[in-house]
Image: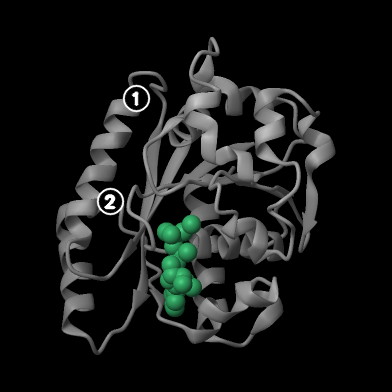
Amino acid sequence: MRVLAFLNQKGGVGKTTLAANVGAGLVRLGRSVLLVDLDPQGHLTRAFGADPGGPGLHEALSGSAPAADLLVQAEGALLLPASPELAGADTVFASLPGKERLLARVLERLPEADACILDCPPNLGLLAVNALAAAHAVVVPVQAEFLALAGLGAVMDTVDAARGFNPGLTVLGVALTRYVHRKRLCREVDTSVRRHFPALRLETRVRESVALAEAPGFGKSIFAYAPKSNGALDCLNLAREIAARGLS
Ligand SMILES: Nc1ncnc2c1ncn2[C@@H]1O[C@H](COP(=O)(O)OP(=O)(O)O)[C@@H](O)[C@H]1O
Ligand SMILES: [Mg+2]
């Protein structure tokens, strides 16, 4: 099982949108997928119409329930939902020995899948550290906007630091999202990413798509909500590219 963390410490850059729809895209490509919602806000959980108010990742991490019993169906993938108590993870788990490897241990007890996608919270607290400790590779969603490159540099520093406790951690790729070709800023961000991270930039640019923004409100992936949209096309291409780079 390849564990891919969708990480960018900045909020609102498209982590959850890409985690959900790359996950659903991989299912459409015939891969088995496990999704884990590490954000106390539970957006990934809601995106599949599941309830982020019940037991979920917090119970799995604290060992109060077997993780496999907490999984729910998500369009052919299995989802470990967020739970509201995750908001207190930094204090609740602070004194536990091995607190950085709680998620890695939970994943060992979950059913095998080709890909396990971790939707990270928008900070570098204990949950993100757990994601970085459990992941094989990081996918970095980047919005084509002002200061995107500064954010990207910060993620690269974070990954470097995480290699201290997870030496094999790699960056699978940088995925540009909310791309609008007629906007000069978008083209400039793309060019800079290409220049600074030539090997890491994924070819697929996920375009700005109203359907991608609407789908989670209906508890559906883009493939169930608007299968013929640009968003569906882009996310399937991105899933294909990620599978080619990162899955065996
Ligand atoms: N390609 C896209 N086209 C249109 N809206 C998008 C796209 N990607 C993300 N969004 C919207 O941008 C906002 C932030 O995206 P989200 O995936 O929740 O970011 P994050 O998880 O990094 O906080 C959401 O309202 C989402 O619907
Ligand atoms: Mg999110």
The percent coordinates of residue 176 (x first, y second) are 34, 66
Which sits in the foreground, 153 or 236? 153
The percent coordinates of residue 142 (x first, y second) are 32, 61
Is residue 15 visible from the viewing direction of this image? no
The residue at which mark 1 appears reads as 163
Which corner quadrant holds the N terminus? top right
**Mark 1 crowdedness (10 Å alpha carbons): few <14, some 14-19, many ≥20:** some
Name the quadrant containing residue 104.
top right
Q: Dot 2: what SS?
A: loop
In the image as oriented, which residue stretches furthest toward the right?
A: 69
The percent coordinates of residue 185 (x first, y second) are 17, 77
Which residue type does callout 2 highlight?
Ala
Q: Residue at x 36, y 50 (%)?
A: 8
Lateral position of residue 154 relative to residue 57, left or right? left
Which residue type does callout 1 highlight?
Arg
| Image vertical order of residue 87 relative to residue 13, above or below | above
Picture colour scheme: one colour
The percent coordinates of residue 248 (x first, y second) are 59, 42
- Counting residues from the start of the chain, the first of labels 1 and 2 encountered is 1
Q: CA distance from mark 1 to mark 2?
A: 19 Å
Label 1 near ligand 1 (CB < 8 Å): no
Q: Which mark is residue 199?
A: 2
